[in-house]
Every structure is written in structure tokens, then in C-alpha cells.
Amino acid sequence: MSDEYNVIANFKVYVENPSKIQEVKDKIGSMAKVYKFVEEDVGFGIKVLRSFLMFKDSEGGIDQMEEKLRSIDGVSETQLEDVSRI
């Protein structure tokens, strides 16, 4: 991993339409450095995309990313699960 990234955040991203999950992944990938994605079925056709994203340790970076994730078409909700130093 690059020295420029020193924080990893795990976001739960709720995708309204499972057929759009790749589109959401692509959009997230254009916004942040992705460590990995894990798809989970919640039920009732709802999928959660656990997005492990890497950041530089800077003030407000996590909040800004959560705002960007919420703005993606097809994302109904986001939730920060965990933040760790790497």
C-alpha cells in the first residue's frame, strides 16, 4: 500500500437496485482509492456494498466521502462502520 494513504474506512453503502451494483462500484472507484468491496444481501432485494476505502489522514476527509457516497444515484443510505490506521 502506498505511503500516501494512512487510513482505511469501511462504509456500508445501501444499493437500491442490485442490477446497478457494478455502476455504483465504478462510481465509488472514481471518487476514492478502493481497497476492496464485499457484497451482502440484506433482504427484500436490497444489497449492501461494504466499501473499504483508503484515505490520507486529513480533517473532514471521512465526512466528505460519506457525503459523496450518498450523492450517488441508486444509493439509498450510507453508514460508516469502522476507521483504522494502516
Image (cartoon, grey):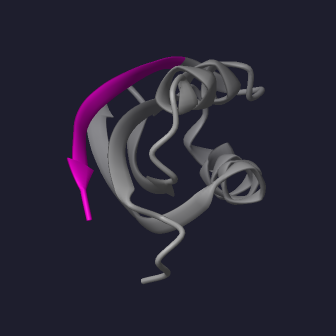
Res 58 seen here: yes
Q: Name the residue at 66% across, 49% down.
A: 28
Pinpoint residue 5: horizontal percent, then vertical percent.
48, 65
Q: Name the residue at 57% across, 25% down.
A: 16
Q: How many marks?
A: 0
Pinpoint residue 40: horizontal percent, then vertical percent.
29, 48
Pinpoint residue 62: horizontal percent, then vertical percent.
48, 30
Left or right of residue 67: residue 52 = left
Report if residue 83 lies within the magenta region. Answer: yes
Q: Name the residue at 74% across, 52% down.
A: 23
Q: On screen, 84 above or below 72?
A: below
Left or right of residue 75: residue 86 = left
Res 46 seen here: no
Give the residues drawn in magenta, as a range: 77-86
Pinpoint residue 78: horizontal percent, then vertical percent.
45, 22
* Quarter occupied by the C terminus: bottom left
Q: Nearer the viewer, residue 15 or 53?
A: 53
Left or right of residue 53: residue 76 = right
**Secondary structure of the magenta portion, mostly?**
strand
Q: On screen, 58 above or below 78?
A: below
Q: Nearer the viewer, residue 30 or 61?
A: 61
* Quarter occupied by the N terminus: bottom left
Q: Name the residue at 68% across, 59% down.
A: 29
Q: Nearer the viewer, residue 59 or 14?
A: 59
